[in-house]
Image (cartoon, rainbow, N blue to C red):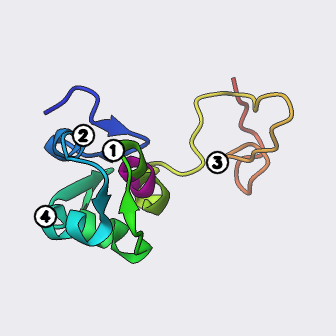
Amino acid sequence: MPEDSRELGIELGDLQETLENLEYPIGHDELLEEHGDETVEMSGNTTTLEELIGPLNEDEYRDYGEVEQAITNMVGDEAIGRKNYSDRTPPATGEDRQDEGGPDQEGQEGQESF
């Protein structure tokens, strides 16, 4: 499995290498016919390539980058992992963020962020 097959919460595994080595351009239907059953993992959940990018109905993909972008665009919240999580405290300059369990939330009045 390629070392860098995880990006933005998406784990392509061996599918990444397969997609990188395809002969492009490749039609959307041809791509799904040949590789639609391959799995994509997102924070412990799995789906098939066809379930993920099938609804796009693209004509063709010119290169791996376009396939990767289609996958990234179609991934929902399941790839995010822990929502509203940030290891930055306090919020960055200009960032208006209220994390779950923050001091301003009910039951957290006495809590202090460090």
Query: How far is the residue under mark 3 from the one under mark 4?
Result: 46 Å
Query: How far is the residue under mark 2 from the one under mark 4?
Result: 14 Å
Residue 18 falls in which quadrant of the image? top left
Identify which residue, 88 or 61, lies in the foreground.
61
Of badges 2 and 3, nearer the viewer stands: 2
Query: How far is the residue under mark 1 from the one under mark 2?
Result: 5 Å
Of badges 1 and 3, nearer the viewer stands: 1
Q: Secondary structure at mark 2?
A: helix
Say which mark, if any, is on residue 86.
none
Residue at image mark 1? 64
Q: Is residue 70 left or right of residue 111?
A: left
- Whether residue 22 is situated above or below residue 87 in the rendered picture: below
Identify which residue, 32 or 48, lies in the foreground.
32
Residue at image mark 4? 34
Residue that lies at the very extreme toward the top in this rendered image: 114
Disc 2 marks a residue whose amino acid type is Glu
Say which mark, if any, is on residue 20.
2
Which of the image's four quarters has the C terminus? top right
Residue at image mark 3? 101
69 drawn magenta: yes
Disc 3 marks a residue whose amino acid type is Gly
Of badges 3 and 4, nearer the viewer stands: 4
* Label 1 with label 2: CB-CB less than 8 Å: yes
Give the image location of residue 101, x and y in percent. 64, 48
Mark with earlier residue (2, 3): 2
| Residue at screen point 33% across, 44% down | 64
Crowd around label 2: few <14 · some 14–19 · many ≥20 (10 Å): some
